[in-house]
Image (cartoon, rainbow, N blue to C red):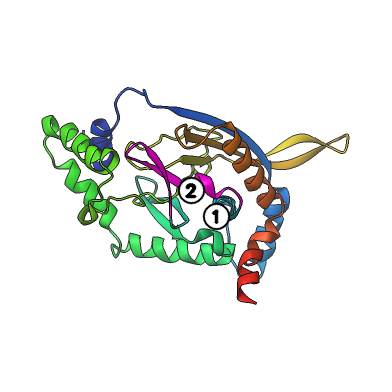
Amino acid sequence: MEKVNSPWRVISTAVYGAPNEGKIYGMLDIDVTDAWEMIKANRAEGRRITMTHLVAGAIGRAIGWDIPEMNAFVKRGAVVKRDEVIVTVAVNMHGGKEMTSVKLYDAHKKTVFEIADEIRNRVAHARSGSENDTMENKSFMAKIPWPFRRMAVLLIRFITNTLGIQIKSMGLGHNAFGSILLSNIGSHGLTTGMGALFPGSKLPAVLIMGKEEDKAVVRDGKIVIRKILPLTGTFDHRIMDGYHGGMLAHHIKRYLENAELLAEAPVEMKTQAV
């Protein structure tokens, strides 16, 4: 039982009930052939970037510059715009047995190289035990006896989500989970999957990267082999609708199909620097 009931599994039984909240879903296939060529070229020069780094950069720029209205959360029945753009990237720990996350502040202003360095450094700190707030909170919640665990979670959700009050001592607030969450299940060999909107997280969307695969597609009337990345999204319908989902898909696709854009500071940043 102990192997199955990790701290997160114990907490999840209290957090999740029957799915009855407003969620919408979307799926998108992106041609990342050229992006992979960019990754390989940079690795040959000693700059290690991954597809996750590129996708995180694309998401940051999309919600930071192109569709800032989706960088928001619900507070006391009203949609409130965030002051910061934070892309949260889920990261495997201990061989995939545990998860932690890295919050990329001002992700829309960073190059893919800055994002890669920041994620690597933060993960190294987390694995060494230097950054363990998330793990400590999980362990604390998991120790609450079962009959009271669900009540404790519901109380916290009421305080933070319904009343809009932040519990800073527990790291719970409007930006506790960032502006948007990205997770890569392709690293586990899974092609596609739909993420869950963590109750009380104030996330408008969770994006899931699947496994990139070589597929036959039509380009200029010819069948060619291209590397395709499946991307799925779960969205809070109170904040986003089909229009926002379509805009998000369009801009993420635009950045990834022109990945060299992510290697440089955004045009807006360059303009401000002049």
Q: Look at the image and give the residue range highlighted in magenta.
A: 66-82
Q: Position of residue 257 (x, y in %)?
A: 71, 50
Answer above or below: position of 162 versus 118.
above
Quarter of the N terminus within the rendering: top left
The foreground one among 1 and 105 is 105
**Observer able to see residue 25:** yes
Q: Position of residue 36 (x, y in %)?
A: 67, 53
Q: Decide: marks 1, 2 in contact (CB < 8 A)?
A: yes
Per the model, the C-alpha gap separating discs 1 and 2 is 8 Å
User: Is 78 covered by the magenta stretch?
Assistant: yes
Q: Is residue 163 left or right of residue 213?
A: left
**Observer able to see residue 6:** no
The foreground one among 230 and 175 is 175
The foreground one among 22 and 48 is 22
User: Is 137 covered by the magenta stretch?
Assistant: no
Amino acid type assigned to the residue bearing label 2 in the image: Asn
Quarter of the C terminus within the rendering: bottom right
Q: How many marks?
A: 2
Answer above or below: position of 72 versus 237.
below
Q: Residues within 10 Å of mark 1 (few under 14, many from 20)?
A: many
Numbered mark located on residue 71 in the image: 2
Name the residue at the bottom extreme: 274
Which residue is located at x 59 percent, y 55 percent?
Answer: 65
Q: Position of residue 228 (x, y in %)?
A: 67, 40
Mark closest to the chain's N terminus, 1 or 2: 1
Which residue is located at x 48 percent, y 34 percent?
Answer: 234
Q: Disc 1 marks which residue?
A: 64
Q: Is residue 69 left or right of residue 176?
A: right
SS class, disc 1: helix
SS class, disc 2: loop
